[in-house]
Image (spheres, coloured by chain):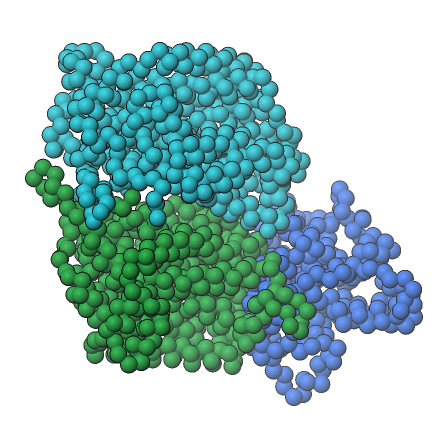
Chain colours: A cyan, B green, C blue
């Protein structure tokens, strides 16, 4: 049935472990001029963003409606980067054999977590107190969300960094060996304990990654709920939506898989390391991407349908605000780009099993997700009176001004720049996982065909 | 570790068809007893039709009670079939093999049983059966498509039809085995049912394609069925407890939790009753338990969303409802039982590897889960109706009558009896699948260890 | 046939200030509409059928305790939640602003009762039985419902239809508050109420009492309100608040 392209085994199956190590580390140490040029451009854009942020701050933290687009950018960066780490964690839990080349690519987004945490800080001054209005925190003190959201996101970021660290540990050690750096070398010394790669060390690493991964998974879902509810849902009167945190999380998962696909595509186009990222990775991720597109629609429909059928004035008000009237254009863009277009691209079997197909769908999803975040966060921050129970007079559409554009461009560029700088610290391809993967598979003959045999250790 | 035994093909045939050709006394005693219970149920239902719904515990405001709880429960159990057969087939999980047929059969019979519930709980059941069908021969009107109660039969019948098709297609090779081992009337029937199966390469290829296509098609049906059943409640905006946007995915994931647990119970019973120790092995229980941990945790997340966002607006009836559920007897005992049995006991137990491989404990925990899930439906439906709006004068209670308890017990007996009787007609472990699993099994020598492995065709 | 077809929109105003909780309306409704006997057993089973009921709430604590009464009947909502959920169209909104129940089509799924925020729908759990002597008081203009059928307040539609036949059809006049009252076409509960708590009329008739009450009380300082207004059901029944010069602000009522 799959006669078009037989994916039997990775093309680098013939390379020895040493060759793979040398190949990856060589590219890791000398990324080329193109890398630094792009970094400089991104750095410049980031400075533009900083200027925009400075102008926002000087305008005062009380003008909440100015901060809408900043909040949307923060949510976008946090959603995508933190959920991207989850992709590696989840695939490791599921023991997927094809996750190995992209594991480090996904874990590297933990570094962007620090950047997103920094983006949260100004928002803590803008977010109004919960006194007198509905919130997730019921009757607790007015600054409860500020404290708890910071702690939650902070612990998530730290956990993500820990996962990145422990997952990279064997590669960092290898790097030290291969590059001939001694124990006293400053750039690596504080980071690496005495790792010798004994069976006990490997076992310990596996357990630590398992525990951290489990914690990360739970914490991520909680942080999605806290950020989406405190910064969007609770700010819009009459909006009581039990599925919204789950919807926000699914959007994050969909967008982060898209982000990983796009990153893989960029690596393939710009670096020789792309040879490790083959059709198998794109195809497997595209299936999950299709599933998340359908889930996106399902969760959106659940929420919309209950409101629309019930015809309660408070809920119809919310629908009019974020879907049908004020933010209707944004919603239409988000819906088309998060569901309609990617679904139509990915549902065609032949297109799904290519490299350009999932990448195209992924790019569209990345843009659509930004529009989706805009309609929640900008809408939430544009509401004047949060103590109301029904949105009777819909606030006007807040169109983005020059400062908003500066902040959006700068915010996203800064995130990408952080990621790129992170690749200087950790190799972008996880060497030890690829070596382990090669050890666990063989190509054998079965009847007349070559067949791949995958070991499933318990 | 795996407990595989090398078995020849003919031995597989004999073993797996043993349930059809041999039967113990115990089997017939069990079936007889179950038939008796079913008969009691029919009697109770007849009495109820004759006297009116007054013989139940239903009243105003609690107009839906045990019967609807049971309806939702059995629809939930029916979701195991698709989860195990379709989804696990699409992700190529080897450990699904013994479970698929039992799961699909359980699906079909629990769906049929679930469908009897809305028929008998109506005020004038002799009219329900034909008035919700879309035909207009004399009355001048069609059923009201705005009503969730009309979407219900469409969804459930679609699911029933596709499940029957699914079971049947997968059964064709097994019918051929039975055709070749029987004489007389059974031989004729099996010959017709096996549609001339010869086991040629082309037929196997078509069979596999059909299986994959059906798996993909049945997935959206599976999600939509329980979503539509959940909208029986979700579209009722007057019942505060039911007007929640999260109901659709919450019910679906609860159904998967309850259904997969039911399949584990059924498999353990089948293994014991028909001596299928070589086919239903501890490693299968191990993998199923790990799946259940993930599903149960996802379910817990949706439950938390439903509970906390129910309280979110802190309005009178909502708060009163949650207080009733958590603090007032006897509802607080039902609530506690539900939480403990559906998550707090089973999942921590399943985290321990030796528990996962212990059949008694697996049977115990999965039965516990289903007890909990029955309570879960009950405490959503009835307390919700007991505390509808702020008209405290109209708040009520509910105590089930002996008629309702008899009928509910009879439904459990009916499903068990039908599954057992079906074991006399078809092999409840798919013979073709079992043999395919044996063929695709392989081993890889890594270092000094032989690691079990699986062959992948693409 | 009348030369001019008026589209009526029947409605009610209930002045809580006047209600004494005597339940004459409840009794009258029972008698007019062939409602099954509500024995003590029925009340204990919570299956008593009261198309109009008087809810009694206690306000305050002893010795400053007060009883508050509110008669609740079908609100005949414009945006009725009970209508879309009936699978067989046994309940729908007619062109006179009323929510009507078609007994013949009802199969008794009881979803409408669940979805009624005011809990004004009643189900026949038992087959209705009247002793021989009481069969003579059954109203021949109203169907007797068997078990398994949902019922509720109909604004005495049998009287309204008769009013249309007699006043508009035979006499060719417009229906007004006066000729409704003269011809005994007002609903039984409205007729029975000793304090004029219940006022019935046509929202589409600007000269009707209920129209003028609505105009008067739905302004600042007026006593008008709708039950469960924030649910958006748009009821055709409006209430006028009780005036209690001794009451403190917002005392929590309890049953």
Q: Can residue A227 be seen in this view?
A: no
* C238 with respect to B163 (left or right): right
Q: Can residue C163 be seen in this view?
A: yes
* A213 with respect to A287 (left or right): left
Task: Kindly identify the residue that appears in the image at 76 percent across and 60 percent down.
Answer: C95
Q: How far from the left and from the top, in percent, is residue B321?
A: 48, 53
Q: Which of C244 and A37 is in front in this view?
A: A37
* B438 with respect to A228 (left or right): left
Task: Give the residue furthest to the bottom.
Answer: C132
Task: Kindly identify the residue that appears in the image at 24 percent across and 66 percent down.
Answer: B270
Q: How far from the left and from the top, in percent, is residue A137?
A: 46, 37
Q: Which of B246 and B160 is in front in this view?
A: B160
- The quadrant in which residue C211 appears is bottom right
Task: Kindly identify the residue that appears in the image at 43 percent across and 72 percent down.
Answer: B404
Task: Kindly identify the residue that appears in the image at 23 percent across and 69 percent down.
Answer: B17
Q: How far from the left and from the top, in percent, is residue A280?
A: 32, 36
- The quadrant in which residue B415 appears is bottom left
Task: Give the residue furthest to the left.
Answer: B448
Q: How far from the left and from the top, in percent, is residue A138?
A: 48, 39
**On-image quarter of the C terminus of chain B:** top left
Q: Which of B357 and A58 is in front in this view?
A: B357
Number of on-image labels:
0
Residue C95 to residue A350: above or below: below
């Amino acid at each position: 049935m799959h006669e078009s392209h037989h994916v039997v085994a990775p093309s680098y199956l013939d390379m020895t472990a040493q060759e793979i190590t040398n190949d990856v580390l060589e590219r890791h140490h000398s990324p080329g001029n193109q890398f630094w040029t792009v970094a400089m451009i991104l750095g410049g854009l980031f400075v533009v963003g900083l200027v925009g942020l400075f102008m926002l701050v000087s305008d005062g933290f009380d003008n909440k409606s100015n901060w809408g687009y900043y909040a949307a950018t923060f949510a976008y960066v946090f959603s995508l980067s933190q959920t991207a780490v989850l992709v590696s964690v989840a695939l490791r839990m599921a023991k997927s054999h094809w996750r190995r080349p992209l594991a480090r690519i996904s874990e590297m987004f933990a570094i962007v977590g620090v950047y997103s945490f920094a983006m949260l800080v100004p928002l803590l001054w803008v977010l109004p107190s919960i006194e007198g209005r509905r919130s997730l925190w019921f009757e607790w003190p007015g600054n409860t969300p500020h404290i708890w959201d910071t702690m939650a996101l902070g612990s998530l970021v730290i956990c993500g960094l820990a996962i990145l660290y422990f997952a990279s540990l064997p590669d960092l050690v290898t790097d030290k060996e291969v590059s001939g750096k001694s124990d006293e070398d400053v750039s690596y010394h504080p980071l690496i304990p005495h790792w010798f790669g004994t069976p006990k060390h490997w076992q310990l690493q596996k357990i630590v990654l398992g525990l951290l991964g489990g914690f990360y998974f739970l914490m991520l879902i909680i942080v999605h709920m806290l950020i989406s509810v405190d910064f969007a849902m609770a700010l819009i009167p009459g909006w009581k939506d039990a599925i919204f945190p789950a919807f926000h999380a699914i959007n994050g998962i969909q967008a982060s898989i898209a982000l990983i696909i796009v990153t893989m595509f960029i690596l393939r186009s710009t670096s020789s390391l792309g040879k490790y990222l083959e059709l198998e990775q794109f195809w497997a991720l595209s299936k999950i991407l299709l599933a998340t597109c359908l889930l996106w629609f399902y969760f959106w429909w659940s929420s919309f349908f209950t409101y629309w059928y019930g015809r309660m004035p408070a809920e119809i008000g919310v629908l009019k605000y974020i879907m049908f009237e004020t933010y209707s254009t944004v919603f239409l863009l988000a819906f088309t780009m998060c569901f309609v277009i990617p679904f139509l691209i990915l549902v065609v079997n032949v297109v799904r099993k290519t490299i350009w197909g999932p990448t195209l769908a992924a790019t569209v999803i990345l843009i659509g997700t930004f529009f989706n975040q805009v309609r929640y966060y900008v809408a939430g921050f544009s509401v004047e009176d949060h103590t109301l129970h029904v949105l009777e007079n819909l606030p006007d559409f807040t169109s983005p001004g020059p400062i908003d554009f500066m902040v959006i461009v700068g915010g996203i560029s800064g995130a990408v720049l952080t990621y790129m700088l992170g690749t200087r610290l950790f190799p972008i391809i996880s060497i030890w996982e690829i070596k382990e993967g090669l050890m666990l598979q063989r190509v054998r003959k079965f009847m007349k065909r070559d067949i791949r045999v995958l070991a499933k250790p318990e | 570790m795996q407990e595989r035994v090398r078995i020849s093909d003919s031995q597989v045939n004999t073993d797996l068809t043993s349930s059809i050709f041999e039967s113990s006394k115990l089997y017939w005693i069990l079936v007889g007893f179950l038939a008796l219970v079913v008969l009691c149920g029919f009697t109770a239902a007849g009495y109820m039709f004759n006297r009116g719904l007054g013989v139940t515990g239903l009243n105003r405001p609690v107009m839906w009670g045990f019967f609807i709880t049971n309806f939702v429960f059995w629809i939930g159990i029916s979701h195991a079939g698709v989860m195990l057969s379709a989804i696990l087939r699409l992700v190529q999980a080897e450990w699904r093999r013994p479970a698929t047929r039992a799961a699909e059969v359980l699906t079909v019979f629990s769906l049929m049983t679930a469908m009897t519930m809305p028929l008998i709980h109506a005020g004038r059941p002799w009219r329900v059966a034909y008035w919700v069908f879309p035909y207009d021969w004399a009355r001048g009107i069609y059923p009201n498509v705005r009503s969730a109660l009309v979407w219900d039969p469409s969804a459930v019948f679609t699911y029933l039809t596709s499940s029957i098709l699914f079971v049947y297609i997968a059964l064709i090779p097994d019918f051929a085995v039975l055709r070749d081992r029987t004489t007389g009337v059974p031989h004729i029937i099996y010959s017709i049912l096996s549609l001339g199966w010869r086991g040629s390469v082309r037929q196997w290829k078509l069979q596999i394609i059909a299986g994959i296509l059906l798996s993909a098609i049945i997935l959206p049906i599976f999600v939509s069925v329980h979503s539509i059943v959940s909208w029986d409640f979700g579209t009722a905006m007057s019942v505060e407890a039911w007007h929640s946007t999260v109901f659709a995915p919450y019910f679906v994931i609860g159904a998967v939790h309850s259904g997969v647990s039911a399949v584990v119970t059924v498999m353990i019973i089948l293994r014991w009753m028909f001596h299928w120790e070589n086919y239903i092995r501890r490693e299968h229980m191990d993998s199923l338990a790990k799946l259940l941990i993930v599903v149960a945790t996802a379910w817990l997340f949706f439950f938390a969303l439903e509970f906390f966002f129910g309280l979110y607006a802190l309005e009178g009836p909502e708060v009163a409802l949650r207080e009733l559920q958590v603090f007032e007897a006897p509802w607080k005992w039902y609530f506690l039982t539900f939480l403990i049995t559906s998550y707090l006991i089973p999942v921590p137990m399943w985290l321990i590897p030796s528990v996962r491989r212990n059949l008694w404990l697996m049977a115990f925990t999965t039965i516990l889960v289903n007890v909990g899930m029955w309570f879960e439906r009950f405490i959503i439906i009835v307390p919700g109706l007991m505390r509808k709006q702020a008209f405290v004068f109209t708040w009520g209670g509910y105590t089930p009558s002996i008629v309702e308890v008899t009928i509910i017990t009879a439904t459990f007996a009916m499903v068990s009896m039908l599954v057992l009787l079906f074991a006399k007609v078809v092999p409840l472990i798919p013979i073709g699948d079992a043999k395919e699993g044996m063929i695709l099994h392989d081993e890889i020598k890594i270092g000094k260890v032989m690691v079990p492995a699986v062959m992948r065709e693409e | 046939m009348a030369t001019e077809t008026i589209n009526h929109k029947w409605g009610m105003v209930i002045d809580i200030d006047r209600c004494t909780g005597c339940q004459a309306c409840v009794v009258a409704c029972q008698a007019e509409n062939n409602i099954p006997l509500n024995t003590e057993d029925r009340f204990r089973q919570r299956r008593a059928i009261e198309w109009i009921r008087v809810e009694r709430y206690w306000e305050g604590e002893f010795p400053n305790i007060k009883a508050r009464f509110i008669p609740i009947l079908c609100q005949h909502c414009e945006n009725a939640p009970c209508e879309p959920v009936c699978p067989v169209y046994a309940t729908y909104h007619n062109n006179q602003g009323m929510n009507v129940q078609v007994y013949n089509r009802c199969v008794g799924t009881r979803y409408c009762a669940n979805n009624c925020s005011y809990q004004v729908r009643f189900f026949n759990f038992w087959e209705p039985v009247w002793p021989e002597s009481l069969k003579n008081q059954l109203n021949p203009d109203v169907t007797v419902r068997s078990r398994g059928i949902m019922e509720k307040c109909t604004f005495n539609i049998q009287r309204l239809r008769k009013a249309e036949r007699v006043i508009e059809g035979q006499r060719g006049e417009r229906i007004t508050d006066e000729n409704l009252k003269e011809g005994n076409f007002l609903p039984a509960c409205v007729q029975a109420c000793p304090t004029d708590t219940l006022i019935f009329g046509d929202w589409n008739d600007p000269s009707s009492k209920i129209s003028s009450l609505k105009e008067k009380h739905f302004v600042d300082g007026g006593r008008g309100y709708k039950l469960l207004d924030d649910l958006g059901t748009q009821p055709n029944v409006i209430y006028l608040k009780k005036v209690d010069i001794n009451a403190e602000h917002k005392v929590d009522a309890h049953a």
